[in-house]
Image (cartoon, helix red, strand yellow):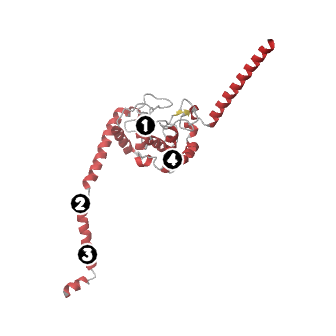
Amino acid sequence: MKKLSARRRHPLAALVVLLLALAATGGLYAAFAPADKAQADVTAQSLAIDEGKKLYSVGCASCHGTGGQGTSDGPSLVGVGSASVDFQVGTGRMPAQQPGAQIPKKKVIYSQAEIDQLAAYIASLGAGPITPTESQYSIEGADAAKGGVLFRNNCSQCHNFTGEGGALTEGKYAPSLEGVTEKHIYEAMQTGPQNMPSFPDTTMPEQEKKDIIAYIKSVNGEDTASPGGLALGGLGPVAEGLFAWIAGMGALIAVAIWVAAHTAKAKKS
């Protein structure tokens, strides 16, 4: 017992115990660590990139180049990120039917699984905006009132006060936001498609994007209606005032003509 006590008091005893504990911890981690899951994730990502490259070669390379470097018919895709692919292909804008001032929204020809594979391949070409998760674009807890202020300051110049869309120059236009999913609105703000400026998180934080989406859905959703009657394109108070002025003045002129005509008849009789 005295010998054992002496060994315990040895200055290197604590170091020996620590080394044994580390060795045991390392052994247990190596035995139970989820290496298979990590390897499976890497393999799945690699397969998605390979499948996406095949889809790209068939449907995209003719315009954007075999390696996404771009051509005279299409811009470079290096660095656009998976969010841009999910938006452009997920709304049917890509592949484009023909070149033009504006690529319109049309029927989607790829499944979501194929879109994810295309996005994985394009993302592998260079870092860019990542496809958002549901928690990022969900409007639960968002403030539609604050979103309205942000929308009017940053978006209404092109999309109108309620997201009805509007004409731009040289045949371009800001599309209507009616029926656009929360995910695609968020991705459009992330990536700035076509004529739209981009609003990364450094410029517009995630919460502000959610507030804007909440506002758009509150004024331009499926179950909303104009409380004042005719929506007049959602152009705002100027258009509504002009309509009221024209209608009111027209009615007054019509009444004045009618009164004058009947007064003249009365005098003749």
Residue 62, label in figure: none
Nearest to N terminus: mark 4 or mark 2: 2
Label 2 near label 4: C-beta < 8 Å? no
Please give the residue where the numbered disc 1 appears in the rendered image.
88
Q: Position of residue 105 (x, y in %)?
A: 45, 32
242 vs 168, nearest the viewer: 242
Q: Which residue is drawn at 55% across and 33% down?
A: 166
Nearest to N terminus: mark 4 or mark 3: 3
Q: Is mark 3 on a helix, strand or loop?
A: helix
Q: What element carries label 4?
A: helix
62 vs 22, nearest the viewer: 22
Q: Please state, as top left, top right, bottom left or bottom right, where the N terminus lies in the image.
A: bottom left
Horizontal placement of 3 versus 221: left or right? left
Q: Quadrant of residue 50?
A: top left
Q: Position of residue 70 (x, y in %)?
A: 43, 37
**Disc 4 to disc 1, how far (Cα)?**
23 Å
Q: Quadrant of residue 269?
A: top right
Q: Is mark 2 on a helix, strand or loop?
A: helix
Q: Which amino acid does label 1 sit on?
A: Gln
Q: Which amino acid does label 3 sit on?
A: Val
| Residue furthest bottom in the image | 2
Please give the residue where the numbered disc 3 appears in the rendered image.
17
**Disc 1 to disc 2, how far (Cα)?**
43 Å
Please give the residue where the numbered disc 2 appears in the rendered image.
32
Which tag is nearer the camera, tag 4 or tag 1? 4
Nearest to N terminus: mark 3 or mark 2: 3
Nearest to N terminus: mark 1 or mark 2: 2
Disc 1: CA contacts within 10 A as few (<14), some (14-19) or many (>=20): many
**Disc 4 to disc 2, how far (Cα)?**
44 Å
Residue 211, label in figure: 4
Nearest to N terminus: mark 3 or mark 1: 3
Which tag is nearer the camera, tag 3 or tag 2? 2
